[in-house]
Amino acid sequence: MQRANFCGRTRREMLWQAGAGFTGLGLTAMLDQEGFFGKQSVAADGVTEWKNPLAPRKPHFAPKAKNVIFFYCYGGPSHIDTFDYKPDMYGMDGKTVDVKTFGRGGHRSKGRIVEPRWKFKQYGQCGKWVSDLFPELATCVDDIAFLHSMTADSPIHGSAMLMMNSGRVLSGHPCLGSWVNYGLGSENQDLPGFVVMLDPRGGPISGAKNWSSGYMPATYQATVMRSQGDPILDLSPPGDLKGGGQRRILDALRKYNEQHQQSRADNSNLAARIASYELAYRMQSEAPEAVDISQETQETQNLYGLNDKKCSAVGRQCLLARRLIERGVRMVQIYSGGAHNDANWDAHGDLVHNHNLHAGETDRPLAALIKDLKQRNMLDDTLIIWGGEFGRQPTAEYAKGTGRDHNSYGFTMFMAGGGIKGGVSLGTTDELGSRAVDDTFHVKHLHATVLHQMGLDPNKLSYFFGGLDNRLVGVEGAQPIWDIIS
Amino acid sequence: MRSCLTILCSVLLFAPILAADERADFSKDDIKFFEEQVQTILKSRCLKCHSGNAPKGGLNLTTRELILKGGESGAAVDLKDVGNSHLVQAIRYESFEMPPVGKMSPKEIGVLTKWVELGLPWPRKLQAIEFHTDAGPPPVNDETKKFWSFQPVKPQKVPPGSGNNEIDAFVDARLKEAGVTRVKPASAEQLVRRMHYDLLGLPPNPQFVAQWVARIRKPNGALNQKEVSRLVDQLLESPHYGEHWGRHWLDLVRYAETNSYERDGAKPFVWRYRDYVIQSFNDDKPYDQFITEQLAGDEIRNPTPDSVIATAFYRLGRWDDEPADPKLAFYDDIDDIVTTTAQTFLGLTVNCARCHDHKIDPIPQKDYYRMVAFFHNVRRYGVRGHDTVLSASVTEIDRPGDPATIKAAMDRYNNDVKDATTRMERIEKIVWEDLQEVEKEDFQFDMNKIPILQKRKGTLLNDKQFNNYVNQFNRLKKLRENKPKGLASALCVKEDVVNIRPVHVLTRGNPHAPAEEVAPGFPSVLSPPPAVVPEVPDGAASSGRRRVLARWIASPANPLTARVMVNRIWQYHFGRGIVRTPSDFGFQGSKPTHPELLDWLAARFVENGWSIKDMHRLIMSSSTYQMSSQGNADAYAADAVNDLLWRFDMRRLSAEEIRDSILWSNGSLNSEKMFGPSIYTDIPAAVKHGQSRPGAGWGNSAPEDKVRRSVYIHVKRSLLDPLIESFDFADTDQTCPVRFVTTQPTQALGMLNSEFILKQAQVFSEYLSQSAGGSLKDQVQLALTRVMQRPPTAQEVQQGLDLIVALQKEDGLSPEHARKYFCLIALNLNEFIYLD
């Protein structure tokens, strides 16, 4: 009747559930690396070896990728204006056609075509058609696998973003980065394992819900990192402690805490908390070093477009992303676009203005990221993902203008590096790009692919919560997109 | 013996076929290939459906012969034409698509194809691949009904033993059995501090500790139990008790004050529910009544304003105001209610049976939908805009008052609202034509109005017009939040009883695939009485179904309700329950460490009128509760995890306790002010920057409100106070039975460098100079006393003085700053946030 180990639920997870409060298992990574817990041979339950949540964990099988950079185009870029070439649409502008769409304007069965507003050209050995929005990124197509037949459950930002980040339209589930950190731990003890960088214009809607660890401990949620100023919240000590003052007060604290601990030696939480202050201290010097772009050559900085006002903000983030994964940060997510309306890719009004703006900001940095990783031999084990929560409709949203409504029936995302084939395009949408018709993929297949490339079996990686064995890819499971895996 | 016979028979049976197959002899390599690569794939990908007596499509893949024989579509493999084999085509997704959950990896497909090409190599000695399918969900039968928690609470004989009360007798019995000795009692100082935090969530005043220590400590060092009981009574009289214990309850009911999703809008009047919970704990409201009010406070015989407020229980969850699939969203919302209700009150994970029978517990899918049926008429929280929320989830609660005054107040109120609205409309008219279509759509949400008008400031609108608009906007908001007395509003449950729709089991949980119709009913494994649902009288506002559910849950005969609640009370006292999985009393949950004690407590709880305060008195007067947290090598070796309760476990303060204690230590905590709309703390701009509209939905409270207790901080699902969040605040989206206790460097950063902590250190420093006089030594002494709630040793004081001197001498800090950083260290002491 009783199953000892239901669906691979580990004893550790059970203890989390059962009363982390008592067993006090919540320690980050870093503590273990200090060697502290190596000496404490037994965890609080007295049975299992101590394992801390973010200590590097063995993958299920040999991984192709070690790190992920998710370049998130918030708002939903239009696939037919970027990478999903629809030659037949040219000349159809203004025509009313029968086409089923579903966006924030609801369900419609007719619409006025808005012809793609940019020209497409062929690039690379694979001859990929790319629009004039991405002339530089287009030079990297031989390293990219395009997925033209993505689908999602919701065409509404709030729920769709949660789905792209956490696999569910319901708020409260851990996001991709949390799953990766839960599955693999972190390799750098002085930096967070999962970093999010936001658009200077603001966060996405639903804010922190997009990088939350949901029902997992906060250990697995993202740390928001700023590319300017204090990179991490509360990182810098007050000015007058910056000399030796902070070290002095930490030493004093340590002395008090060690005295307190003396008669309580068997409580590892106390020792862990002492150690956590030393790690915080180290983070204070490590994090600023990681974000110190002045260490990069002028050439590299220019490659990312730091000398071009239009794209310097994104360029800086992409360069930082490279520096962070170099230092062992497991996943970096960059948000292109923030706040509302035209401050992100949500082109309801003037499509041309909107996409010129956002593609202009991101084209060069993205190309630079791929090229830079490649020349440093890092592309092979870095998985890059590009895309938003959905694409856009072929027809106009309103009676006038070029604005397109949301489209979750079919849209494009791309992946590069990390064991993904280059020069590949998979899946098709219909002749208008209104919906995926061939080799249809769901967000969960994308997630399954990411986990698989990281060496994690998407159908095995589970976390027990609320009586259920939860997985990023859902109870029914999902297979990776094998055809783009090299 | 019997199995040998079976094998023998099958060997004989298949022998002719084997002989007939000319390719029956395979090379060693081929066999190895099968054993090492093919078999695992078959097991992991195919046999779940294609094995046993009734394999899918009639195809059984566990023996070579059966594969060759094939199923309904004929032979699975054509050894002469590999490419045309059903099996190969199916795994390539060329004919059937197998496995249906998704194409296998190219490598796996390659292995199986090669296997077919090789002619299905199969070891001679292997008759059939051994494959055990999952036994399937446990049935509801006499055996499963016998599970301990599904049985009625049994009367327990108290074993003989020493100690203060019956609890100790039960605990002693197990200790004796294991040969483990319990540690000695805690010191009076430790105990007073422990009890004070335990009941109030606040540090005791050092004078208070001293007073009570003097009363509690007998000359021989023992604890005076009479005085301990008096202390418990005194603490239970404090209004702060409800603030602390109410918060435990709020964790369970996923209390939050906003809806999540794009707008993450604020729930109107939700704080009344929080106040109701606090007040209920302070009043020691019988737990059965507490249950009934929350589940059916509108359906009881004489609803009161409080009982209606209690039904906000249904309104605390997430709300997607523009769901892609409205029908699914309807059932997602009910699922949230079923999950919370079943786990919180019954410790049952009924929610696992939404898509199929529960895999672990004997809870059939049908039982899930029978539970759904109790809630099926509950209206969704809202449809889209704020007005729909007001209509579906807000009601006026009847407060006494004379009609004429109410009417006058109401008229005034209506006039004010109209006036503000008219003024706003006048300004909106100026810009309306200029708005883009997108903006017109956005304008329906209040949160978008000011940002949209702001874009026209300086062009279409002059400063005066814009400012006027903002003023009227805020005026309207204030008006709505403060309706005239006598017409107060509350968040509550409402039903749609005009059309009571039938409830169906939903195939795989899919709302578009209804199956069998079901009536309301209780989980069958609990052998419950039938749920008799009343006829709905004409004009009734609700179906009365929830009252039927509430009655059954709040009944002494329910095997789970009392057990689950006493276990929770125990958990909040000791750091974990007698059952360690407090919201899962099913097969998957952990067994009680002291089953007899649990039943004894449950029975006592019901006998004493479901009084929670009575349970506190009982538990806190036990020797078990009063033990020291000190270690003991022998006991630790025998039971490191302290399942036997040989000592009291140390605990870290909760997020709220940490913030409240910081504010209390430096004298700034405003604990006098209780109840009312929530407050906004100072959230750093860097954190607000993560929002799509930085600062949206986060107000600015008056200085005296910012230092109120943490239970009053606005719980915004997408924006939490960083200090509260980093110390493991409860998950806001789902019921939270146990909080995590993590230790992370980011906590240390926040406790050393955040604006909040540096400000509090500064306040602390000023407090010292005002309260301890001019002597630095006295100041250090006072600081340490405040944070440790005991007199510090001379050495501890000296260390503080040394630090202050060194910071001045070596680091060039001013005396004031040096003292401030000493205060900062005091607030970071382990002793400050860990209790013995």
Image (cartoon, coloured by chain):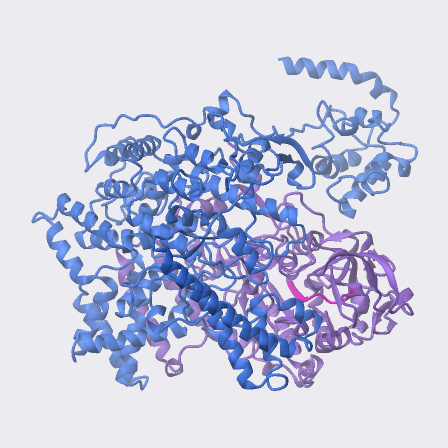
Q: Judge by depth and name the residue closer to the eye, A138 or B520.
A: B520
Task: Please name the color used to draw chain B.
Answer: blue
Please indicate whether residue A244 sits to the left or right of residue B474 in the image. left
Which percent across, then down, holds residue B773? Answer: 16, 78
Residue A43 seen from this side: no
B684 sits to left or right of B626: right
Q: Nearer the viewer, residue A362 or A248?
A: A362
Q: Residue B461 falls in which quadrant of the image?
A: bottom right
Q: Which of the 4 image quarters holds residue B62? A: top right
Query: Which residue appears farthest toward the front when viewing the image?
Result: B404
Chain A in the picture: what colour? Answer: purple
Say how many tags the image has: 0
Please name the residue shown 41% across and 77% down the image.
A237
The foreground one among B172 and B588 is B588
| Residue span colored magenta | A68-79
The residue drawn where x is 63% and y is 31% is B517
Q: Is residue B431 left or right of residue A80?
A: left
Q: What residue lies at 56% left-to-right and 65% top-to-bottom? A: A207
The residue at the far left in this view is: B219
Residue B741 on image: x %, y %: 41, 54
Residue B460 inside the magenta-drawn segment: no
Image quarter hosting the N terminus of chain B: top right
| The one of A341 and B91 positioned closer to us in this rendering | A341
Q: Position of residue B163 (x, y in %)?
A: 19, 37
Query: Is residue B366 in view from this perspective?
Result: yes
Instruction: Examine the rendered structure and indicate whether residue B265 appears above or below residue B252.
Output: below
Above or below residue B151? Residue B662 is below
Residue B774: percent from the left, percent from the top?
A: 16, 80
